[in-house]
Amino acid sequence: MDADARTTATVAADGAARVRRTSASWVAGGLVCAALLIAGLAARRPASDARTAGASSSPPALAVPIVPVRVRAMPVVLEATGFVVSEHTVQVRPQISGLLKRVFFTEGDPVRLGQRLFLIDPAPLQAELDSARAARDSTRANLERLQGLVQGNYVTPQEFINARASAEQAAAAYRRAAITLSYTDIRAAVAGRSGGLTVRAGNLVAPTDAAPLVTINQTRPIEVQFSLAQQFLPRLRSAQAGGALGVVVLREDGAGELDHGSVVFMDNAVNASTGTLTLKARVPNEREQLWPGQFVTVRVQLALEPHALIVPETAVQTGPAGNYVYVVVAGRATKRAVSVDRHQDDLAVIATGVKDGEQVVERVPTSLRPGMVVRESAPAPPRARIGLSGAGT
């Protein structure tokens, strides 16, 4: 019995051991499978994360204002900065030396042509005139006396000739003294506006003085001098052949009109150092809004261009290679070189580079680069887009 019991116990113990070994194998296998599954998932996650990161790193389309290139009738207006010059500037100087007795105007006031301005003490010159008159009268009387005597041969012909020469010299001296006396009364040689006085009554004046007594500038009419690039010379000549070239004079900032006039002078040569041509325009200046030396903006209208390509002035950028715009093609900004004919009223008239209807970026942000994806932003206010729509397009 004891032997059978021991045998049974041994068999039971071996079975239990096999069961434990089998269970351990299953557990180990499960752990290995779990590890492999986790490793596989971990291996796939970076690729998935990379794809997600790649998708999220694509930049969004840049919002920019976009406008079409338009064709419309545009006046050919050339604009330049000029300055006002007086057509007649007179420096009033004494022609004789003497004591300045009186000043008959207030400096800065307008003066009329022929208006009395200054009086130099006339007393010394009046005395010289009186002496010259007496000498003239004496020699004239002597000549008349000798004229009767020479006919009766009481005096020689030579004596009569000498007397006549003396009379003529005395008469000339009298006229010269009268002219010199007239120089004491100084009058305005031109109508205009007086400048500042450089001398006051009671001072001695002379023709050799460095400064004039006063300077008078004609202000009505007045002229505006300006320069235009030589490339416009053919247009200027063509327009001038059809009549007077009209001009509009505006404030220096171009904000308001001051007067209208016409071109009265075109230089006969281009300035070789600047490549510009000098012109002058005359305007009435009845309200005296223009002052000599004042800077202004001048617009010269040459003709009407019926089919001008226009874009907003802000669309044109300048780089090392020249002017360019960003044209939107298939949702991307493409940099394109353009040739600008002129700028006018916040618009740029394009000579070459774009076509009617093409879309351009109106205001270029600093972040925009060629090839970037763009989309149209909210429309600009109507004031900013003036000239690009409506009649005439």
Image: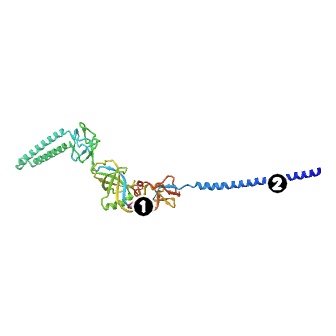
Q: Quadrant for residue 202, please give it.
A: top left
Residue farthest front in this picture: 1
Q: CA distance from mark 1 to mark 2?
A: 88 Å
Q: Amino acid at mark 2?
A: Thr
Q: Position of residue 7 (x, y in %)?
A: 92, 52
| SS of the residue under disc 2 | helix
Return the residue nearer the eye: 249 or 12: 12
Return the residue nearer the eye: 278 or 96: 278
Return the residue nearer the eye: 367 or 87: 367
Q: How is the image coloured?
A: rainbow
Q: Is residue 148 left or right of residue 385?
A: left
Please name the residue that numbered disc 2 is placed on.
Answer: 22
Q: Position of residue 73 (x, y in %)?
A: 38, 61
Q: Nearer the viewer, mark 1 or mark 2?
A: 2
Q: Amino acid at mark 1?
A: Arg
Residue farthest left in this picture: 152
Dot 1, how many residues are within 10 Å of its Cα: few (below 14), some (14-19), or many (20+)? many
| SS of the residue under disc 1 | strand
Q: Position of residue 165 (x, y in %)?
A: 13, 47
N-terminal label among 1 and 2: 2
Say if residue 60 shows up in the picture.
yes
Say if residue 316 shows up in the picture.
no
* Residue 275 - label: none
Q: Are marks 1 and 2 in contact (CB under 8 Å)?
A: no
Please name the residue that numbered disc 1 is placed on.
Answer: 70
Q: Position of residue 179 (x, y in %)?
A: 18, 45
Return the residue nearer the eye: 322 or 270: 322
Residue at 32%, 50% in the rendered image: 84
